[in-house]
Image: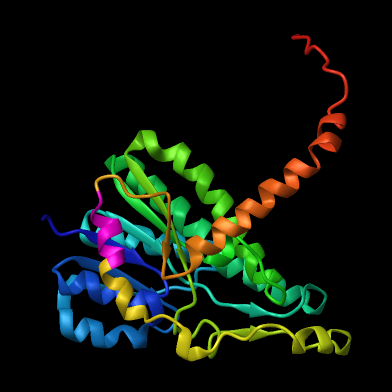
Amino acid sequence: MTPKTWFITGASKGFGREWTEAALERGDRVAATARDVAALQPLVDKYGESVLAIRLDVTDPDAAQAAVVQAHQHFGSLDVVINNAGYGLFGMVEELTREQARRQMDTNFFGALWVTQAATAVMREQGSGHIIQVSSVGGVFSLPGLGGYHASKWALEGMTSSLAMEVKGFGIAVTLIEPAGYATDWGTTSAVHADPLAAYDDFRAHLPISAAARRADPHATRAAILAVVDADEPPLRIFFGRGPLALMQTEYAHRLDEWASWDEVSQAAHGEVRAVVGT
């Protein structure tokens, strides 16, 4: 198999680090980005010219553009671009500050958008490529206390679904990875917590808590990411981890039932059909 060239954001830890190492270990090349580029030095020491470490804050659109261009010029091509940088924002919708909400969208959604735009231009010119967005099971359903995070991932899902249709004709594949709960620092050291309002104390006390011991192993995703990258026809959407499929089957059955039960009102809201007169 011909070695691939990857571009991965948030490569210093979590999924980004696992997938960077998985690619390098099999002989691929990786442009690894992180806000703290020093954290990538062990990869440079071990893999030498196969890895290009780039300092990148994805919330800076000019820096995102420059990083993609730098990686392409350095390696001569870009086969796989993974938007992995992101974090969790915890708090009831009413509790979120303007700064917290905007920063969440800037990182989880707009950061991915800036990198995607730059990568699409490169891949369109070369006539091939694979853009992978790290969404979440929280990108297709919602829980209380994570409204800001869900908003960022639902936005990413919508943008990426449109992107997939737009770029297919250029030979570019697009995939949304929707992980379940993994033992990364998403919910710990990387997380941001809004200041709690007392009004939600009772509600918060009765929220289910996922035990850390039940969270999946990020290392186990290495084979999965390689399978997605190497597929002749990669999926638009794929869950990583056990549980999401059954959860979504229940969730979507409920949605369909609710839409159906209100369909009479929906149909009445259509009104009389009016002919559209061209000009």
**Residue at the image point whose x is 68% and y is 51% from the top:** 255
**Can residue 110 be seen?**
no
* Residue 4 pos. (x, y %): 20, 58
Asked if 264 appears above or below 35 in the picture, the reply is above
Q: Nearer the viewer, residue 2 or 40?
A: 2
Where is residue 43 shown, x and y percent of the image? 24, 82
Quadrant in the rendering for residue 265: top right
* Residues drawn in magenta: 224-231
Q: Main secondary structure of the magenta part?
A: helix
Q: Residue furthest left?
A: 1
Q: How many marks?
A: 0
- Tell me, yes or no, whether the highlighted magenta stretch contains residue 232: no
Q: Indicate yes or no whether the magenta region holds residue 228.
A: yes
* Colour mapping: rainbow
Q: Nearer the viewer, residue 184 or 263?
A: 263
- Residue 172, placed above or below residue 253: above
Can you see residue 252? yes
Query: Residue at image x 17%, y 71%?
Result: 50
Relative to 201, is 218 on the left or the right? left
Task: Note whether 69 is above or below 138 in the view shown.
Answer: above
Residue 12 lies, in percent from the top left, at 37, 81
Q: Closest to the observer: 106 or 257?
A: 257
Q: Residue at x 26, y 60 (%)?
A: 227
Q: Say which residue appears at 50% left-offset and 68% top-offset.
A: 58
In the image, is 110 to the left or to the right of 255?
A: left
Left or right: 127 in relation to 138: left
Work out which quarter of the rendered image holds the C terminus and state it.
top right
The part of the image, by quadrant, that contains residue 1 is bottom left
* Image quadrant in which you'd find residue 100: bottom right
Percent position (x, y) of residue 79? 27, 54
